[in-house]
């Protein structure tokens, strides 16, 4: 019985090689493509959503500008921010001092740069510290569940019941307000929100197959939380961190305005506003507007960034 050239049996001969290549390609795609390819496409989709958000791009540009302005600017525009010079106090903007001088004779433009360094450092560091601790705390609580979850969340609820502003004022009065202390104080009150958000994510993630596999294979709860639950809640954590930076900068500015922030000779934008209020009726506008505008712009920029990141991660989660 003759075989037709295109029959199934005839493919078992020399013509079978393309079929094997196709099978090998399918296996390679099954091993690598179906895992890495979709993930890369999801990241691209999230990035495209972020790039299409004009407010996010504006916010990112503002943040980059202020980071360069505050940290690179002092190397290009040299000023003395340690020695006071009362003979130059409250001078209006001029070629020698583009933003004038403050009541102690410091160059206001240079002061704005150094004050921005403290504000950005405290805001970003406090947000990162609060997010990392809150993420691990909430992931552990949601993953383990049961009595431990109840105890950990009641602790969070109890701390949230205390007025955060009142507690922050008391603590900043007790401890000497330096940058490190302010980072710890603001982070100590900011991690509570992250813990509650990540707990909700962990309650869902602990039912996923890859997390159940860790339990079946005898993996510890610590490994499951650190290697699987917390990394898969990174979207929520990143969005929370971006909003918390803005909140931390505003909180530091508020404490500085009350005189409880970073103490002289160091300063922050809130401390500069506090100095400006004494001369608010004297027409010294250059003391008030630059730090005020800087606080508003940076806070809005981080909020724009947080909104865009939330939309980007929502696209990735919906496509999963």
Image (cartoon, rainbow, N blue to C red):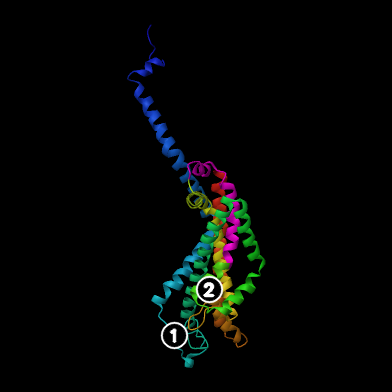
Q: Work out whether mark 1 precedes mark 2 in sequence or the reverse, and give the earlier one.
A: 1
Q: Which residue is mark 1?
A: 82
| Residue in the foreground of this view, choosing between 240 and 13 | 240
- Which residue is situated farthest in the bottom direction here? 87
Q: x, y percentage for residue 146?
A: 62, 51
Q: x, y percentage for residue 206?
A: 56, 46
| Residue in the foreground of this view, choosing between 151 and 242 | 151
Q: Which mark is residue 215?
A: none
Residue at 60% x, 61% y is 193
Mark 2 residue element: helix
Number of other residues with Cα within 10 Å of mark 1, as a class: few under 14, some 14 to 19, many 20 or more: few
Q: Is residue 165 visible?
A: yes
Q: x, y percentage for residue 62?
A: 51, 66
Q: Which residue is mark 2?
A: 182
Q: Quadrant of residue 278?
A: bottom right
Q: Is residue 53 visible?
A: no
In this rendering, the label closer to the viewer, 1 or 2: 2
Q: x, y percentage for residue 232?
A: 52, 50
Quarter holding the N terminus? top left
Range of magenta residues: 189-218
Above or below, 120 against 35 in this view is: below
Number of other residues with Cα within 10 Å of mark 2, as a class: few under 14, some 14 to 19, many 20 or more: many
């Amino acid at each position: 019985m003759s075989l037709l050239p295109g029959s199934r049996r005839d493919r078992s001969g020399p013509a079978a090689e393309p079929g094997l290549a196709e099978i090998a390609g399918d296996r390679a795609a099954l091993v690598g493509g179906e895992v890495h390819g979709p993930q890369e496409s999801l990241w691209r989709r999230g990035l495209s959503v972020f790039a299409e958000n004009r407010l996010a791009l504006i916010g990112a540009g503002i943040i980059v500008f202020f980071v360069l302005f505050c940290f690179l600017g002092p190397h290009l525009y040299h000023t003395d921010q340690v020695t006071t010079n009362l003979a130059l106090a409250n001078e209006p903007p001029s070629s020698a001092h583009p933003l004038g001088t403050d009541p102690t004779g410091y160059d206001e433009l240079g002061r704005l740069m150094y004050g921005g360094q403290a504000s950005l450092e405290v805001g970003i560091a406090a947000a990162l510290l609060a997010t990392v601790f809150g993420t691990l705390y909430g992931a552990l609580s949601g993953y383990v569940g049961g009595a431990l979850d109840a105890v950990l969340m009641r602790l969070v609820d109890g701390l949230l019941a205390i007025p955060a502003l009142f507690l922050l004022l008391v603590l900043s009065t007790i401890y000497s307000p330096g940058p490190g202390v302010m980072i710890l104080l603001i982070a100590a009150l900011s991690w509570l929100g992250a813990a509650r958000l990540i707990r909700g994510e962990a309650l869902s993630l602990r039912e996923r197959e890859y997390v159940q596999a860790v339990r079946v294979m005898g993996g510890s709860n610590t490994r499951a939380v650190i290697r699987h639950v917390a990394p898969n809640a990174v979207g929520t954590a990143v969005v929370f961190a971006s909003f918390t930076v803005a909140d931390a900068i505003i909180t530091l500015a508020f404490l500085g305005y009350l005189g409880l922030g970073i103490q002289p000779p160091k300063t922050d934008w809130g401390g500069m506003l506090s100095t400006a209020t004494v001369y608010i009726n004297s027409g010294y506008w250059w003391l008030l507007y630059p730090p005020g505008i800087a606080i508003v712009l940076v806070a809005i920029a981080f909020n724009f960034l947080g909104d865009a990141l939330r939309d980007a991660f929502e696209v990735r989660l919906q496509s999963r």
